[in-house]
Image: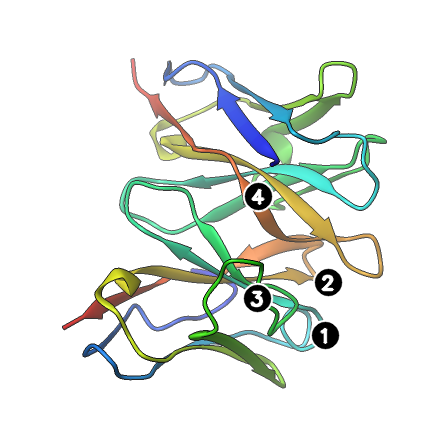
């Protein structure tokens, strides 16, 4: 059974960089046909897609966050990571890592497997 | 402001059939697959429907999805108390080159 385990600091100071890692078990991150990515959910609000990466390094990012996001992959460790720079209180959220399938045009589609979520609070 | 539009709330009594709508555009729902998720507060979302109308293994057949033009719907028949949760739709958007989510619908079982 595929499992995703996200981890990272629960508290980040304003203007600093948020860094999270997701370890994949029960499957290989280098499997073809899947993107690996991040979704976040501010307290009491809805889901916001952040971005995805293919094992080859190909990425898609949310246009509204693109200037601050880096998603990377380490196939040797079967894990992928998120960096979000210049954070503010508006970036406080539960961050989910997730596996996305692909459509016929090699675009990511809705996630099928989700991690448990990591609450990140931005505060001084 | 979400790219996909859902009603903020829906409700029904046990045994009833309820539907939740998801409205998009020609760059997302109109040409791409729709996905539906169920989220019980405090837990990660769970995939209910993929590819517009396909159920993953383990999802009861009380849940069904459909799509027409630039809109999609999730139907829940034989409503149960455990169906009380938040429901989200999602799709790939060709114009944004991004996955987009609806704002979510809170389902209350009366």
Image check: A117 left or right of B83?
right
Disc 1 crowd, CA 10 A, few/some/many (<14, 14-19, 20+)? some
Q: In which quarter of the image is residue B56?
A: bottom right
**Looking at the image, residue A5 lies above or below residue A109:** above
Disc 2 crowd, CA 10 A, few/some/many (<14, 14-19, 20+)? some
Q: Name the residue under label 2.
A: B94
Same chain for the residues under marks 4 and 2 in the image: no
Which dot, 1 or 3, sits closer to the camera? Answer: 3
Q: In which quarter of the image is residue A53?
A: top right
* Residue A65 visible in the snapshot: yes
Tag 1 near tag 2, CB within 8 Å: yes
Residue A5 appears at what percent x and percent y? Answer: 52, 25
Q: Which colour scheme is used?
A: rainbow
The quarter of the picture where the N terminus of chain A appears is: top right
Residue depicted at x 42% and y 60%: B1
Q: Please tell me which residue lies in front, A1 or A112.
A: A1
Residue A72 appears at what percent x and percent y? Answer: 71, 24
Residue depicted at x 48% and y 73%: B61
Q: Please tell me which residue lies in front, B60 or A28.
A: B60
Between the C-alphas of marks 3 and 4, the distance is 14 Å
Q: Which chain carries label 4?
A: A
Q: Please tell me which residue lies in front, A102 or B77.
A: B77
Q: Name the residue under label 4.
A: A113
Q: Does dot 2 land on a helix, a strand or a loop?
A: loop
Residue depicted at x 51% and y 16%: A17
Which dot, 4 or 1, sits closer to the camera? Answer: 4
Q: In the drawing, what numbered circle is on residue B31?
A: 1
Q: Mark 1 lies on which chain?
A: B
Q: Name the residue under label 3.
A: B55
Q: Does dot 4 land on a helix, a strand or a loop?
A: strand
Between the C-alphas of marks 1 and 3, the distance is 20 Å
Q: Mark 3 lies on which chain?
A: B
């Amino acid at each position: 059974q595929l499992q995703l385990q996200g981890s990272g600091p629960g508290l980040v100071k304003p203007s600093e960089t948020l860094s999270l890692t997701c370890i994949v078990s029960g499957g290989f991150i280098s499997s073809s046909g899947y993107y690996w990515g991040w979704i976040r959910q501010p307290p009491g609000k809805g889901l916001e897609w952040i971005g995805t990466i293919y094992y080859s390094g190909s990425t898609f990012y949310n246009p509204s966050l693109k200037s601050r996001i880096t998603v990377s992959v380490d196939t040797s460790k079967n894990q992928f990571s998120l960096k979000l720079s210049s954070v503010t209180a508006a970036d406080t959220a539960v961050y989910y890592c997730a596996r996305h399938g692909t459509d016929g045009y090699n675009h990511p589609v809705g996630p099928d497997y989700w991690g448990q979520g990591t609450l990140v609070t931005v505060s001084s | 402001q979400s790219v996909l539009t859902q009603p903020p709330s829906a409700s029904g009594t046990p045994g009833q059939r309820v539907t939740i709508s998801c409205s998009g555009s020609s760059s997302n729902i109109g040409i791409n697959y729709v996905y539906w998720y169920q989220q019980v507060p405090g837990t990660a979302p769970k995939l209910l429907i993929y590819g517009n109308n396909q159920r993953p293994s383990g999802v009861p057949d009380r849940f069904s999805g459909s799509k027409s033009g630039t809109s999609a719907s999730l139907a829940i028949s034989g409503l149960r108390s455990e169906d009380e949760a938040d429901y989200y739709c999602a799709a790939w958007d060709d114009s944004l080159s991004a996955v987009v989510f609806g704002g979510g619908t809170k389902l209350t079982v009366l």
